Every structure is written in C-alpha cells, then in structure tokens.
Amino acid sequence: MLKIIIPTAMLMPMTWMSKPNMIWINSTIYSLLISLISLSYLNQLGDNSLNFSLLFFSDPLSAPLLVLTTWLLPLMLMASQSHLSKETLTRKKLYITMLTTLQLLLIMTFTATELIMFYILFEATLIPTLIIITRWGNQTERLNAGLYFLFYTLMGSLPLLVALLYIQNTTGTLNFLIIQYWAKPISTTWSNIFLWLACMMAFMVKMPLYGLHLWLPKAHVEAPIAGSMVLAAVLLKLGGYGMMRITILLNPTTNQMAYPFMMLSLWGMVMTSSICLRQTDLKSLIAYSSVSHMALVIVAVLIQTPWSYMGATALMIAHGLTSSMLFCLANSNYERVHSRTMILARGLQTILPLMAAWWLLASLANLALPPTINLIGELFVVMASFSWSNMTIILMGTNIIITALYTLYMLITTQRGKHTHHIKNINPSFTRENALMTLHLLPLLLLSLNPKTVLG
Amino acid sequence: MKPPIFIIIMLTVISGTMIVLTTSHWLMVWIGLEMNLLAIIPILMKKHNPRATEAATKYFLTQATASMLLMMGIIINLLHSGQWAMSKNLNPMASAMMTAALAMKLGLAPFHFWVPEVTQGISMSSGLILLTWQKIAPLSVLYQISPTINPDLLLTMATMSIAIGGWGGLNQTQLRKIMAYSSIAHMGWMTAIMAYSPTMMILNLMIYITMTLATFMLFMHNSTTTVSSLSQTWNKTPLVTLLILTLMMSLGGLPPLSGFIPKWMIIQELTKNEMIMMPTLLAMTALLNLYFYMRLTYTTTLTMFPSSNNMKMKWRFEHTKKMIFLPPLIVISTMLLPLTPMLSIL
C-alpha cells in the first residue's frame, strides 16, 4: 500500500518545487502513473481479501473504489486548469496540494483495516473538501454551503465514534478482518436500536439519504469543478462503502430497522428525480440526480443480499464516473457562458459537435442504457428489491422512467434546438476538455466489456 | 512595569503554582493558591485602564471566595481525618466543598461568569497566562482528590460547562471572549473524565495549553483583538492565516489534528465506563464550539472579508511581543495524532 501512499504524498513537494509552467503537467502525469499502480489491486483472489499490512487491506469491494479514486485525481487536475489560470502561482500550488491531500486521505480511507482509522480518515476528508469549496467556490452562497456540509456530516458521525468505541469494548477489536468472523447477532432491544442508528446515520448523511440531503445540492453547486467531481464521484461512495462494512456488525437488527430508511430512499428516489425535471440550474440538476442514484445504493445495502451488494458496487463505480463526467460537461458550459442556467446555452450541438457527442454518451450512461455498468447496477438492485418485496417495483420503475426523462430533458435543452444568439462567440472545445471526457468515458465503456471487476 | 518587579512577580506566580503541584500538606496548597492569586493581580493590571482594574477586581473577588471555600473544605477534612496530609480518602462534605471551590477557580459552570469578563478586560498576554497557567494549579489539586469526588457533581458541571462554552461563544466578536468561552468548554471536557481516568485530564490539559498558547501568540502577532481586525491577516502575514485555520480546526476537535486526541480518548474512557448517551451529548455540544471557530476561519482564511480600505493598511511593524517556541507549538497543536500511542508515557 505504501507504493501508492508515498507517491501520492510526494506529489505535494513535487508541486511546490516544479517550475511554474510545469505544475499541471507534472502532477497530472504522475497521478496517472499512480493510478496505474492501483490497477494491479483489481486482481483479487476470490475467497479472501488481499492483506497488505496490519493497517491496510483491499478486497473486491474497496479495490474498484480505490482505482476510481486514483483515476479521478488526474482528471480533477485537468479539469481545474482553466478556472485557476488567473490565480497566482502560490494559490495554484495550494489548490493542487488540497486535492492531493484529499486524495491521500481517501486512499487510506478505502483501504483502512481498523474501523477507528476509517473513522478518523473519513472525518479528515472533510477538511480539504471544506477548504476547496469555501476558498475556491464562486458565489457568496459557498460559505453557507461549506457550513452545511461540515455540520451535517459531523452531526451524523459523532454518534458513530461513540458506537465504534462501544463495539470495540464489547467485541474486543475493530479490525475489519477479524470482525467478519466474530460478529455476533444482536437482538432488537432499544439500546441496540440506538446502536444501529448511531452506526448508520453518519453514512446515511454522507450518501445522502433523502431527508438529510440538504447539504448536497448546496455543496455541489457552490464547489469548483474539482470539488464537485470529487464530491460526487468519491465522497458519496465513502458513505456507501462505510455502510457496507458496518452492516456486517449489525445483523439481524437491520431487518427491523431498515424499514424507515428503505421507505425514505424509495420515495426519495422518485422525489429527487422529479425535482430534476424542474431545475433551471444545470449543476443542481446533476446534484439531485446524484441523490437519486445514491438512494438506489442505500436500498441495495439495506436489503443485504449478494446480488444487491454486487449491484450497489457496480452502481457506485458507474455513478462515480458518469456523474463526474456530467459535472465536467456542465463546467465546460459554465466556463464559456459563466452561468449555470441551462436555457442560456442551448443548441450547442450546432457549434460544438464533438462536445455534443460526449453529452450524448454521458446522458445515455446516466439513464442506464445497456450494456453499461450503470444498467447492470440498477438492474441488480431492482431485481433484488423486487425479490425483497414485490411492491417496490412500482417506485423503482417510476424512478427509471423519470431518470430517463430528466436526462433527456437535460440533453435536449443543452444540445438540440436552435442555439441562442449570444453563444456564437464561445471558445471551441479545448483538447484538454475532450481528453477529459474521453478519460471519463473509456473506463465506463471498458467496464461494460468486463463488469466482473466491479461487481465485488 | 519595571523589569525587576516584573521578574519578581512572575517568579511568585510560578512558585505559587509549583508549591501547589509539589506539596502534600493542605495548608501549603492554600498558601500556594493565594500566592498565585495575589501575584497575578499586577499582571492583570498591566494596562492601567478602568477596564483592567474592574477585571482584576472581579478576578480577585471570585478567586478569594473560592480560596476561602477551599480553606473551609480543608478544615473540615482536618476535623474528620485529624491530619493535614493530602491523602486519597477525603470526607465527602470536604470533597464537595473543595470541588466547588476549585470549580470556581477554574471557571467551570455554574461558576463561569467571571471568565469572559475578566479575559476581556485584560491585555492579550495577561489573558494568555490567565487561561493557561492558572488552570494548572487547581487541576492538579482536583487530580489528587479525584477518587473521592462525587461523579454526578463532576458530570453535571462538565455538561453545563460544555454547553455554556458552546452557546456563550456564539454571539461574540471579541477574540478574548471567544477564547474565554473556549476555555470554559475545554475545562468541561477535562472535568468530565476526571472521575474515571485523571490521566486523560492531564492529556487534555497539555494539548489544550499547547493549542491556546499558539492561538494567543498568533493573535498577539497580529495585534488584533476583534474578529474583524483578524480578518486583515491576509494582508500582513498570509502564512498566519493558514496557521489560524489549522489551529481553529484543532481547537474544534476535528480529526486528523491533535485537538481530536483528547476528545477521542475522553469518549473512549467514558464508553468504557458504560456511559453512552453522555459522550454523544458532549460531542454534539462541542459542535457549537466548532461553529464559532469555523466562523473565525471564514473571516480570516477562507474569504477576503469586507472591510473599509483604511483598515487594510495596518501599520506593518515588526512584532515585538515574545513568541517563544511558536513553530514547535504549532506543530504539536496540529500534527500529534499519529503519536497517540505515545500517551502511555503519561
């Protein structure tokens, strides 16, 4: 694991000591090389996890997420080059340092063995994200957004700390590898219900669950592009990953306790998808679609069947890539028009046809077109929830239709139709932007050829 | 004040605390605390304005009352045990009285009313001594009598302190009052764990003193006393803005900074003693503290705070206050978390 951690940590001195015209090039190339190293972890043995040391391990659940995280750093750096071009050199280096710190903490979070270390790093990822949102965001609402983000997450996760320490005292260890075999079933007493709630609320807030999702549209909209990318692609998956790890300890209380959250997620899926149909702000639309996709993951994790876990993992990776790509596309709009309102930049297909192709592919991935892994994830989750209860198919089916509706709405509004007269003067697509979209899309398409890697 | 006099007074303050720390005779404890009190009054009054006089008077009156209450407890202990040595078995009534007296000295709720007003009236460096050095002596006495204190009393005072430290600091714009409420809240955390594991109290005290020293020194470097003048730090020394950001987050107890260590350890000790709701409640109330630290970082580091143009042209003198040991202090206040297993030395 050190072969990933030390190079990522060393990206920081390298950034500070590079020549001014080389900072972006150096950091992007070296972070791409680091992501190549992490690809070797995808080769997992079937029956047990790969253990690297007492502290770090990776199993078929965390390896795809690790690869996603390391893949995303070069993409974030490429996406940020344009909006940071006017800043002073020190601030650019600070920004890259923030992104690298966040990357380092995320890598360690996804591979942590001890649950307390996972908790510490989980909380630690809040600080660089807060700094990125508040310092480099664009509107005045970003202050409020940062505070909402920080305090929602902390309110959820402080009970988790108490619960983890309690579990350590009763079970003797919090090392994940041991707990897999040592977990005793807990009965449904009041105190165990509180334990369940304490463990899960942190991840519910992070996912986010429908009732607690208020921080997400604010944070996504106000963050700069790299912040939005990392929030949507990786930080939400922290919640899903944590939930999958901790439900091992919480059987069989989950069967009773899951009902309210299942209902919130199922209903929330449909509600947030419907809200997307009425959004004027492009980033806000993508943010609400993230809530909707993550609600599917919550449903999958709470059902706890093998198929639903496979679907949840695939959906997390797929959504990470798709949602990050959509944010990059929205950002390419924003950099030209300097407004996030969708109708201000219509009919882009006539002016930027290659970008329109990326919009088309991203939208098709978002609405879970076969044979992408988005479809595989959604299909597994829908099938698993159907077997859990027949009635859920109504809501799930409605959600799939509404997802298709708002994705096509977004596509048609931005790409088709007559273009507004004021966008004649926009810059053509940069090669950097096209490369960015390709790098998002290629893993997605390649994974549809071999989905077994992400099925966990 | 003249250097020789200042040296004598500081020596008296230090020796007062040292007497309290090293003695085993109850009367010497009282004597040490009184020496400390009397010698620190001139330090509080370094600036000769009526505000400082009022602050010093308030400090003197409350602390003298507390000393008398402590003396009463000592005498009751003498009556019931027949000897002056500090031992572990204390009469419950004496122990309750001593706890109340020491709580008054420390500024724990419900005896916290003097802390913001006194801290506000005095200069920054005196405030620094008040909030860090003055806590050592009473806490050491509490450490020694901790087995006999009623845990309910301690936990009530702790919960109230953390809550009052959190809510009280929310509407403040003066930095000294913010640090005063922060001190009340941290004292609350220290007393919460005293009944179960006094070692964690020492840990919390060490880390709190380090962080508060560093914070005060950074405030003195900028010669600021209000939040809005702190927001001009980006103009004077941009590096200090980054340091204030990390220090504030460390004070708020965010991982992975050192301020998280005491909170983690305290919550661990409390859960080991079968208390689940209490640490959750304490941790949630500490989030209020984090809110006003975050507000400080927003105005200082993360935004360029709106201000009139002539505020931006602060006089850029070389700082003349003593900043002893500042870089190591900052490193200890922020990067100590990986060394947590080292606390077995305590």
Image (spheres, coloured by chain):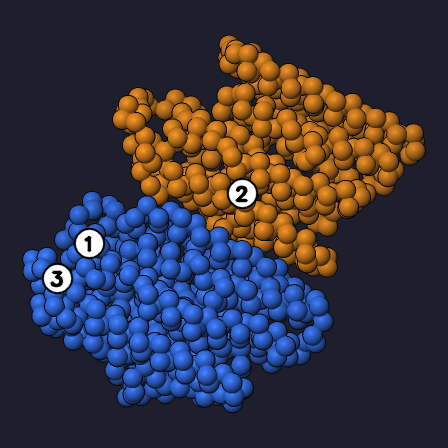
Mark 3 packing: few (<14 Cα in 10 Å), some, or many (20+)? few
Mark 2 packing: few (<14 Cα in 10 Å), some, or many (20+)? many
Above or below, comparing residue A115 to residue A397 in the picture: above
* Residue that appears at 17% across and 70% down: A415
Chain in blue (letter):
A
- Which chain contains the residue that carries disc 1? A
Q: Nearer the viewer, mark 3 or mark 2?
A: 3
Please report contact status of discs 3 and 2: CB closer than 8 Å, yes or no: no
How many numbered discs sit on the rendered protein? 3
* Percent x, y of residue B164: 62, 38
CA gap between label 1 and label 3 equals: 15 Å
Q: Which residue is mark 3?
A: A420
Query: Is residue A425 left or right of A16 when viewed as pictured?
Result: left
Asked if labels 2 and 1 share a chain, the reply is no
* Percent x, y of residue A200: 56, 68
- Which chain contains the residue that carries disc 2? B
* Percent x, y of residue A405: 31, 76
CA gap between label 3 and label 2 equals: 50 Å
Q: In the displayed orientation, state which residue is furthest to the left.
A: A425
Q: Which residue is mark 2?
A: B289
- Which chain contains the residue that carries disc 3? A
Q: Secondary structure at mark 1?
A: loop
Q: Quadrant of residue A380?
A: bottom left
**Residue A338 numbered mark, or none:** 1
Chain B representation colour: orange
